[in-house]
Amino acid sequence: MSTPAPPSTLHVGGASPYDVVVGHGVADRLLGLLGEAPRRVAVVLTPSLRELAGPVLEALRSAYDVTELVVPDGEAAKTAETAAGCWEQLGAAGFTRSDAVVTFGGGATTDLGGFVAATWLRGVRVVHVPTTLLAMVDAAVGGKTGVNTAAGKNLVGSFHEPAGVLCDLSLLETLPRVDLVAGLGEVVKCGFIADERILELVEGTPPEELLAPGSPVLRELVERSVQVKVDVVVADLRETGGAGGHPGREALNYGHTMAHAIERAEGYTMRHGEAVAIGCVFVAELARRAGRLDDATADRHRSAFARVGLPVGYAGADYDTLRAAMAVDKKSRGDQLRFVVLEEVGRPVVLAGPEESHLRGAYETMRGAAS
């Protein structure tokens, strides 16, 4: 087996700059990102990951007083009640503004832990150690934090950039194959909105190689996807809009309006990357019907996501249910639905108030593609 390449560092500029480290066995960088200022560090993790987190916890205990904030697995952690429980533990431990939070887990743990860090004393330092492919390329970078409510996903949250992110690809060796596949949903999305080379790698590499944690191709996909998000976030941290008609940070939500509606309909039991794949195929069909996207690029969505084993259709809820859920999406304005669509690969734009017939037609196509 070949020796992994040295870690790479992607720098995130802006008002609160930080580094994203990508490589194998990079946990030793954690103390350097936290620095000497904290006396106490809270680690947000789930019971199922406590053994995997052993080396991280041991390293942290060598330098800080460590409090473990154990939270539920998956989206069940992202509630106001769980966040409140974390706040109480931080208060009991005497956490001050110079102390820090470390998240160790997937996207839900990252979202929740980031929200706790953002709201404790109006913001303390946080470093993310994502353990899933999805979290590495999505939740850990960009500073969006949040919890879910009965009304929808991530409707309560805050922007709070991390002090650093450690993407230790060695952690992916313990990840079930289905979760690796789901993580590719956000990767392929990045290819469509900004970096066609991602699509070329996905289309030209055997799926087994794409899904091998030690694969140089998977590492390149992670690095490229992180870079896409970094470039967009630096230009538009708070989603106020881009220049020259570009949607800015909103482009990262490509496919997410329908994806979040599906997740809600499924009681948040569907993997996020799977929902995103379906959502991207749906919005490509919507753009095709609206005359914004050519047939070949719309069809390419279905083939690219299906190639890595992701679903491209959904029939688990009726149109009215999904449309009502989309109406409370964060991108909606008043009664008007807004979607990020493509005019071509790498050229996202906003489609506001699409025709109802186009929405229904895209839904029927999505329903018909369900396996």
Image: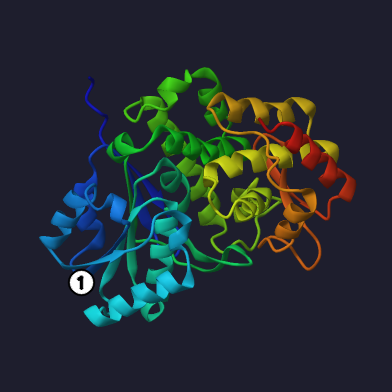
x and y percentages locating residue 90 in the rendered image = 29, 76
* Relative horizontal placement of residue 285, taking residue 50 as reference (left or right): right
Picture colour scheme = rainbow
Total number of numbered discs in the rendering: 1
Q: Secondary structure at mark 1?
A: strand
The C terminus, quarter of image: top right
When the figure is inspected, residue 94 is found, relative to residue 353, above or below; the finding is below
Q: Residue at x 72, y 40 (%)?
A: 282
Circle 1: residue type: Arg
Q: Determine the residue located farthest toward the left in the rendered image.
A: 62
Residue 139 position (above or below residue 41): above
Q: Identify the residue at image location x=65%, y=33%.
A: 312
Please name the residue shown 36% across and 74% down the image: 85
Image quadrant containing the N terminus: top left
Which picture quadrant has residue 8?
top left
Query: In the figure, 11 relative to 79: above or below?
Result: above
Please indicate, yes or no, whether residue 355 appears anywhere in the rendered image: no
Residue 246: x percent and y percent?
68, 50
Which is more toward the observer, 175 or 320?
A: 320
Q: Nearer the viewer, residue 249 or 126?
A: 126
Residue 293 visible to the viewer: yes
Q: Locate residue 305 relative to residue 331 in the image: left or right.
A: left
Q: Position of residue 136 (x, y in %)?
A: 41, 45
Label 1: how many Cα within 10 Å (few below 14, some 14–19, many 20+):
many
Q: Is residue 145 left or right of residue 333?
A: left
Judging depth in this view, the residue of 320 and 157 nearest the camera is 320
Quarter-wise, where is residue 210 in the image?
A: top left
Image quadrant where residue 220 sits:
top left
Q: Which residue is mark 1?
A: 40
